Image (spheres, rainbow, N blue to C red):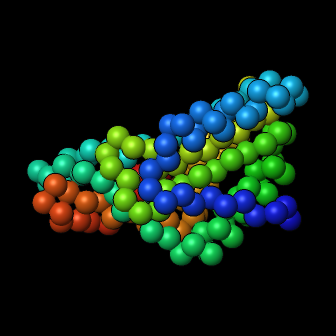
């Protein structure tokens, strides 16, 4: 198994972090395609209240192990060059980025398939929990839409 890579970031994932990640790959000339998934907090309306933020929490060690397992499975299944996964912990406001998944490969179709596989695995298997916070500070636990 490859070395574990830190996935969690406290708070929202800044656009500058995403841009910097993309910029670092310009020197890797065997890459022909990148695909990126950005998960953004929505201002959903639930029972006449609007979501202002989501507070993410996790069983960090268990989640990190699951991220590592998904990473290895994806490398085994697809001919990808590299992969990056970052997920927020703590409070992320509506409109901010909470999940950044970045895959590179020699060819675009592989990147497309790998990113979809990855995001579906993350959403269905990783123990990350979201508490939706409303403008009146009341909250409910978020249920992932698969």
In this rendering, the count of numbered labels is 0
Q: Can you tell which quarter of the image residue 7 is in?
A: bottom right
Vertical position of residue 119 compared to residue 140: above or below: above
Pick the residue in front: 37 or 25. 25
Image x and y of residue 31, in percent: 82, 28
Compare residues 7 and 106 and report the one nearer the observer: 7
- Residue plotted at (84% across, 51% down): 76
Instruction: Work out which quarter of the rendered image holds the N terminus and state it.
Output: bottom right
* Location of residue 49 in the rendering, given as x and y in whole percent from the top left corner: 14, 52
In the rendered structure, the answer to whether residue 37 lies left or right of residue 83 reads left
Which x, y percent locates residue 93? 33, 50
Q: Where is 19 relative to 4, above or below?
A: above
Left or right: residue 96 compared with residue 134: right
Is residue 66 shown to the viewer in this render? yes
Q: Is residue 25 left or right of residue 15?
A: right
Q: Residue at x 54, y 57 (%)?
A: 9
Q: Toward the viewer: 77 or 69?
A: 69
**Residue 106 seen from this side:** no
In the rendered image of this protein, does residue 52 appear above or below residue 142?
above
The spot of residue 140 in percent (x, y) is 26, 65
Residue appearing at x 58%, y 38% in the figure: 18
């Amino acid at each position: 198994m490859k070395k574990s890579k830190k996935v969690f970031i406290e708070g929202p994932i800044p656009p500058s972090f995403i841009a910097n990640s993309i910029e670092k790959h310009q020197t890797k000339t065997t890459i022909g395609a990148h695909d990126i998934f950005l998960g953004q907090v929505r201002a959903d309306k639930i029972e006449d209240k609007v979501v202002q933020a989501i507070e993410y929490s996790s069983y960090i060690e268990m989640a990190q192990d699951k991220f590592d397992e998904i990473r290895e499975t994806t490398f085994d299944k697809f001919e990808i060059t590299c992969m990056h996964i970052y997920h927020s912990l703590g409070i992320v406001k509506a409109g901010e980025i909470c999940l950044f998944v970045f895959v590179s490969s020699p060819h675009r179709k592989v990147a497309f398939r790998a990113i979809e596989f990855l995001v579906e695995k993350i959403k269905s298997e990783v123990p990350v929990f979201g508490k939706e916070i409303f403008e009146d500070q009341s909250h409910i636990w978020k249920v992932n839409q698969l």
